Amino acid sequence: MGIYKIIDIVGTSTKSFSDASKNGVIEVAKTVKNIRRAEVRKFDMKIVDDEVVQYRAELNIAFEIER
């Protein structure tokens, strides 16, 4: 049975919530290994001058700790 750690991250995109989620996982995978699960906790947008300029996805990332 493995031991897992969960971290909170925020992914961003100028295109979509889906891209924001994917970008978050891609960036975390550069430094975190053994990722097992990503759970989207919240979506929000950055608005400037009544325009959406950034999509944000808050994620919980679960990864197995090596022993």
Image (cartoon, grey):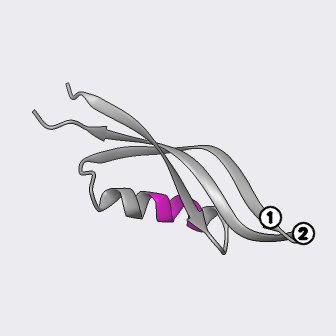
Residue located beneath label 1 in the image: 47
Quadrant housing the C terminus: top left
Q: Amino acid at mark 2?
A: Asp
Q: Left or right of 3: which side holds 14?
A: right
Considering every residue shown, the one lying at the far right of the view is: 50
Examine the image and state in which quarter residue 12 appears.
bottom right
Near mark 1 (Cα within 10 A), the count class, few <14, some 14-19 or many ≥20, is few
Indicate the secondary structure of the residue bearing disc 1: strand
**Residue plotted at (39% across, 35% down):** 6
Vertical relation: 54 (above or below) 1 = below
Vertical relation: 48 (above or below) 59 = below
Q: CA distance from mark 1 to mark 2?
A: 6 Å
Residues tagged 1 and 2 counted as in contact (Cβ below 8 A): yes
Q: Amino acid at mark 1?
A: Ile
Pick the front one: 34 or 1: 34
Magenta part of the chain: 19-24
Q: Position of residue 35 (x, y in %)?
A: 31, 48
Near mark 2 (Cα within 10 A), the count class, few <14, some 14-19 or many ≥20, is few
